[in-house]
Amino acid sequence: MSTKNSLHLFEAFGVELEYMIVDAHSLQVKPIADQVIYSEVGAYLSDVEFGSIAWSNELVLHVLELKTNGPAKDLTSLAALFQEHVRKINQILEKFEAKLLPTGMHPFMDPHTETKIWPHDYNAVYEAYNKIFDCKGHGWANLQSTHLNLPFANEEEFGRLHAAIRLVLPIIPALSASTPIKEEQVTGIADTRLDVYRSNQQKIPSIAGSIIPEAVFTRQAYEDTILKKIYKDIAPHDPEGMLQDEFLNSRGAIARFSRNAIEIRLLDIQESPVADLAILEIITCVIKLLVQEKWVSLKEQQSWHQEELSEILLEVIEKGQDAIIHNWSYISCFGIKKGLECKAGDLWKHLVDQLLKNNLLSDPVASVAHIMLTEGNLSKRITAALLSDISPEAIKNLYGHLADCLEKGEVFSLAKYQNHKSTS
């Protein structure tokens, strides 16, 4: 597994951010990602490199992905780099009367009538997915996420990293949920994107499993337990073997042995890169402390069954920071030693407090974390901003404001939004 050029734990990071392209006035999705790339480089390419940041296509034509072009040495500088490219793309989009829209789901897209699959390079893979699963649905065509790639250099590092990531996955949506609305309706679910994502491949259940990966901590065990089962189950639907690759695995974190990294895929994208990178820094610090066995041993971390962790995850997907975690054995894994139950939001307050006391968070991240933990995750802030007015016009105005946050690189604050409404 190891090579002499392999990156060790936390030596570098890979980040991917997905954004919707929408009409600048109506906010309806605008399937022109290929035209954006063509207008910049004169070709319909799947990947375009601009130094340390690259752009790439996704399954559908109204989504564009920004990503680190190779491993980045630290997370702190990435927010400004991504923000620079957000503005660059928005400048290109002006001539199309379009702009980028954040959050993990479009609030009023009808994917059954508005979905257009990427038709150029790599289309064969997308059409294979479409043939098997029919990708004209929210779980395919209307979900934008943030991905974090963390490296490992050898088998021992993989086992430690996978154990720590599995333990953190169930509470990530308490920070990152940004999708309370689907088809102009408040769903009552904090992370609607994950709610549809976890069932979008039920035709072949082994692909996503329980979202939480199984308790396997070597490459051989991972391939035998997870990958071989997936490849076997997809084979009757994929006779050409086009989908039998690591990317087919749709768990909330997937091992990418081809590049010696674990990719965390559970996060809804936020309102701006500064918010996304703050969450990634917080999550990474917690994973690092678990790897160091600060609160609980590696043996204890590896003992958790995926179904135990999935039960917690499902509660957090639904209720976000208000989800009550009753499993005290789980709570104690993060250094809380007494009590009967704990809300997911309180657990994150405890963890962020620990990180601050140990000077592990930068000042900008600390200020973003304060908003997320006092006003709530973005999903909760969106719901609160709408109050009792969930009319199409109110939703459009709010998401238009979120698009402004993205362009300006700001964190969405309820107080600022109420002031914006009263003066506009």
Image: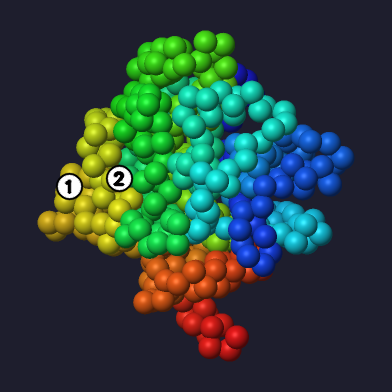
* Picture quadrant where residue 65 is located: top right
- Between 337 and 121, the one lying in front of the other is 121
Q: Amino acid at mark 2?
A: Leu
Percent position (x, y) of residue 393? 52, 73
Percent position (x, y) of residue 400? 59, 69
Q: Residue pushed farthest right?
A: 42
- Residue 327 is tagged as 1
- Say whether residue 251 is left or right of residue 280: left
Can residue 209 be seen at all in this image of the molecule? yes
Q: Residue pushed farthest front?
A: 113
Category of crowding for the residue at label 2, using alpha-carbon neighbours closer than 10 angstroms: few (below 14), some (14–19), many (at least 20): many
Percent position (x, y) of residue 60? 61, 40
Residue visible at 72% across and 47% down in the picture = 32
- Residue 202 is tagged as none
Q: CA distance from mark 1 to mark 2?
A: 12 Å
Residue visible at 47% across and 16% down in the picture = 237
Q: Earlier in the sequence, mark 1 or mark 2?
A: 2
For disc 2, the marked residue is: 313
> Helix or strand or loop: what does disc 1 sit on?
loop
Q: Amino acid at mark 1?
A: Asn
Can residue 361 be seen at all in this image of the molecule? no
> Helix or strand or loop: what does disc 2 sit on?
helix
Category of crowding for the residue at label 1, using alpha-carbon neighbours closer than 10 angstroms: few (below 14), some (14–19), many (at least 20): some
